[in-house]
Amino acid sequence: MQGLSKAYGYRAVLSEVRFELRAGECVHVQGANGSGKTTLLRILAGLTPSDAGTLLVSGREMPPAELARTGAVGYLGHDPYLDGRLTVREHLEFAAVCFDMVSPASRIDELLERADLVVMQRTRTRDLSRGWRQRLALCRAWLPDPRIVLLDEPDSHLDTEGLDFLASLLGERRAGAQGILLAGHRAPSGWADRILVLKEARLTEWAG
């Protein structure tokens, strides 16, 4: 990402942000409340337009929205944004259609089993606890086997088993050559390969 800038009115949230996300690594973006972490992820997910900036994927310029439409980006926002009328399985089936996935049933089965959601797959999401909805949102983010995964406080509301599920997904990044950008106040030890700090609209490498 090169020269990423975003302002709301006269307030600069991101200013000339530049960073590289390599295949197989997890980068943790830290910052205070309101520092712009969520805005950064939403721009990269193609959900919020930037004022300036260029996204390069393998050296090729590509608008974030275009990249997201290909299923190359998995995104988990601060809120899971689940339709309470749909069942657990219906959510993933609908997401598979949006990603233009062919024969997604086996992938859905795999993720439901790993997340311990098999027995709940016919349950409407409005009847799930916040922690179970977070697990479902993680399944949706990983459903298309994306090249880039964007996670906004992914450990929110997860119990011990839910954290283990998340850790297992993150642990596969090297084998799957996935680049993962994780935003939050903290990241459990061992999750991130690098830490970036977002402060006063600037993104800098944490020296430790």
Image (cartoon, rainbow, N blue to C red):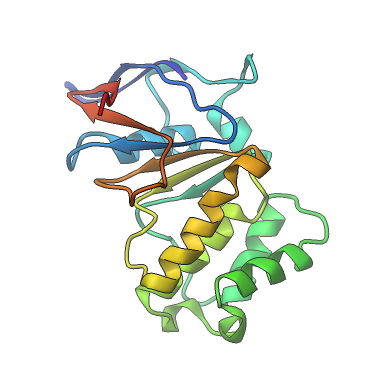
Residue 172 in the image: above or below residue 91: above
x and y percentages locating residue 141 in the rendered image: 55, 53
Q: Tally the marks.
A: 0
If the image is split into quadrants, where does the C terminus sit?
top left
Residue 126 in the image: above or below residue 156: below
Decide if residue 152 is on the left or right side of residue 20: left
- Judge by depth and name the residue closer to the eye, 208 or 187: 208
x and y percentages locating residue 7 in the rendered image: 26, 24
Figure quadrant of residue 79? bottom left
x and y percentages locating residue 73 in the rendered image: 58, 41
Figure quadrant of residue 182? top left
- Judge by depth and name the residue closer to the eye, 74 or 23: 23
Residue that sits furthest to the right in the current view: 103
Can I make out residue 156 in this image?
A: yes
What residue is drawn where x is 64% and y is 56%? 143
What residue is drawn where x is 54% and y is 58%? 168
What residue is drawn where x is 55% and y is 27%? 22
x and y percentages locating residue 53 in the rendered image: 44, 16
Residue 83 in the image: above or below residue 42: below
Can I make out residue 82 in this image?
A: no
Decide if residue 102 is on the left or right side of residue 157: right
